[in-house]
């Protein structure tokens, strides 16, 4: 009886990392993503010069550093959907136009962060839906493809 209890204590942490909780969290991320994930464009805008690189491409670093003092700027919010491990987070990026306060577009992404059980080879990479390229996807959708 003692041997079974000791074996249970030893195996419990190992079996806890089997990943059913992570698979369920990934399923929830996919389900949430189908509801409102991805890009939504409300108005298209010409690419402003201060966001244009020398080669005509969108300067994503400059866009990421914009503030509400700029003519076009980004606002980001994050919300914890599932606080218990594995955590699920919702990120929303909105591109705003200062002159009238209009939302030009938004990008919603869901994330289950990396899972580390402390056991080698049981590490789970983060899971995003739809993708982690939020700023670039949103900028291309609102401004159009560069050089067009």
Image (cartoon, rainbow, N blue to C red):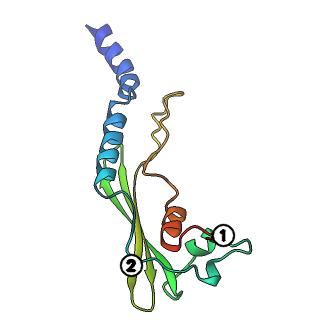
Nearest the camera: 108 or 116? 108
The span from disc 2 to disc 1 (Cα, nearest Å) is 22 Å
Q: In this view, does 63 lie to the left or right of 77?
A: right
Q: In this view, does 15 lie to the left or right of 67?
A: left
Please name the residue shown 29% across and 14% down the image.
5
**Furthest residue in direction right, as rendered:** 54
**Residue 73: image location, x then y, percent:** 50, 80
On the image, which quarter does residue 108 sit in? bottom left
- Can you say whether 84 is above or below 92 in the image? above
Q: Is residue 53 left or right of residue 75?
A: right
On the image, which quarter does residue 18 sit in? top left
**Furthest residue in direction bottom, as rendered:** 99
Compare marks 2 and 1 and give the one earlier in the sequence: 1
Q: Name the residue under label 2.
A: 103
| SS type, badge 2 | strand
Please name the residue shown 52% across and 69% down the image.
139
**Furthest residue in direction front, as rendered:** 148
**Residue 49: image location, x then y, percent:** 64, 83
**Label for residue 57?**
1
On the image, which quarter does residue 7 sit in? top left
**Residue 140: image location, x then y, percent:** 53, 67
| SS type, badge 1 | loop
Quarter of the image where the N terminus is located:
top left
Badge 2 crowding class, 10 Å Cα cut-off, few under 14, some 14 to 19, many 20 or more, is: some
Badge 1 crowding class, 10 Å Cα cut-off, few under 14, some 14 to 19, many 20 or more, is: some
């Amino acid at each position: 009886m003692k041997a079974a209890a000791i074996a249970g204590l030893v195996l419990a942490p190992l079996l806890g990392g089997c990943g059913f909780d992570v698979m369920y969290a990934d399923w929830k991320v996919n389900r949430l993503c189908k509801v409102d994930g991805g890009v939504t464009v409300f108005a298209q805008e010409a690419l402003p010069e201060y966001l244009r690189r020398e080669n005509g491409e969108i300067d994503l670093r400059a866009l990421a550093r914009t503030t509400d003092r700029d003519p076009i700027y980004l606002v980001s919010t994050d919300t914890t959907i599932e606080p218990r491990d594995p955590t699920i987070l919702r990120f929303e990026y909105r591109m705003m136009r200062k002159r009238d306060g209009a939302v030009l577009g938004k990008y919603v992404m869901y994330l289950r962060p990396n899972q580390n059980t402390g056991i080698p080879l049981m590490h789970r990479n983060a899971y995003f839906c739809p993708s982690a390229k939020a700023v670039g996807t949103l900028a291309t959708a609102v401004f159009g493809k560069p050089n067009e």
